[in-house]
Image (cartoon, helix red, strand yellow):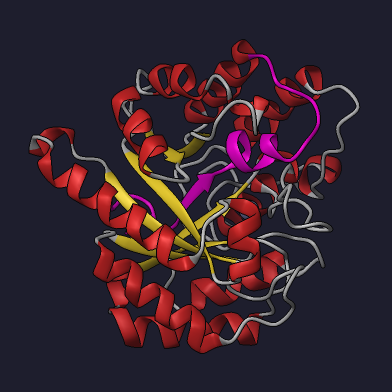
Amino acid sequence: MPESRDIDVLVSEVGPRDGLQSIKSIMPTAAKKAWIAAEAAAGVREIEVGSFVPATLLPQMADAAEVVSYARTLPGLTVLALVPNFRGAETAIRAGAHKIALPLSASETHSKANLRKTHDEVLAEVRRIAAHIRELPEAERPGFEGNVSTAFGCTLEGPVPEGKVVELARRLVEAGVDEVGLSDTTGYANPAQLRRLIRLVRAEIGHDRLSGIHLHNTRGLGLANALAALDEGITTLDSSLGGLGGCPYAPGASGNIVTEDLVFMLDSMGLRTGIDLAKLLAVRRILIEALPGEEMYGFTPDAGLPKGYAAGGWGVPAGT
Ligand code: ZN
């Protein structure tokens, strides 16, 4: 559920993690901070600011602890960090992450490529992390989310059985996560499949334990999938500014759904995100300057806002 009731949908920006880990350029720490601060100032409430993987594997994330500490100083922002294992979780919690997310790939082949671990080994890490969190003083306990990644298909294994995704969601909850998310890491999902899987997983683990969906726009179905998820009552949608993103271990997977286009869709439908769209569009300049030559996506940034556009949807007359 969104952290506060004054919004309908929580747009969770994942660009500083998902986007940056999958491009060759390394964004300077100062630019990451400027990006995160500018999005927070535009009203974005949750940002996945980095990944706690060894810097030898992902030099783009070497400054994750510094970025988390900085992001913690921004008022009203939930600071999320991706952790691949117990060690990463410990470091992320020490740095001050409000929430940590651990990916469990439904495809075991992808899991071995991405985390170098089998399902059982990943779930053992989840149990260790959950036990560690329980030992912390209550005020210092971060939220703990388990994400079933490659939930809709895998570039290495192909189709992923839905029963496998449901089983892994249940095992994540049993291992101690607070909530489960579903990730279309590879951009294979379609709206019908998404609706079916959301219902199946919720029937197994309970409605409130599945609130977030992570989508990629690899085949152009990102916003159609986002709408299907909303219709199913999903309240958190991941996206990345400029559609940066992908997965270095899932060949052919391209960017996340574009934050600017997602916010335009939600805002024009009259759904409250808390985000000022004009301010959000201006943040793009930071990325263009810090990542010369990197491809950026999005229709709304190119087209601009429609004439007479009023924030909060077409139902609200301009000037009121
Ligand atoms: Zn992703």
Q: Report the span colored magenta.
A: 1-28
Relative image position of residue 175 (x, y in whole percent): 27, 64
> Is 49 rendered above or below residue 155?
above
- Determine if the magenta segment contains residue 19: yes
Q: Could you tell me which residue is drawn at 68 percent across and 65 percent down? A: 223
Nearer to me, 120 or 37: 120
> Is 37 rendered above or below residue 4?
above
Q: In this rendering, does residue 8 appear at all?
A: no
Residue 299 horizontal side relative to residue 318, left or right: right
Q: Could you tell me which residue is drawn at 53 percent across and 73 percent down? A: 229
Relative image position of residue 317 (x, y in whole percent): 57, 53
Specify the farthest residue to the right: 293
Relative image position of residue 115 (x, y in whole percent): 56, 51
Q: Could you tell me which residue is drawn at 54 percent across and 86 percent down? A: 162
Which picture quadrant has residue 63?
Answer: top right
- The quadrant in which the N terminus is found is bottom left
Main secondary structure found in the magenta portion: loop
Residue 74 horizontal side relative to residue 25, left or right: left
Q: How many marks?
A: 0
Residue 302 horizontal side relative to residue 318, left or right: right
Which picture quadrant has residue 211?
Answer: bottom left
Q: In this rendering, does residue 9 appear at all?
A: yes
> Is 192 rendered above or below residue 27?
below
Specify the farthest residue to the top: 30
Relative image position of residue 172 (x, y in whole percent): 34, 67
Nearer to me, 175 or 42: 175
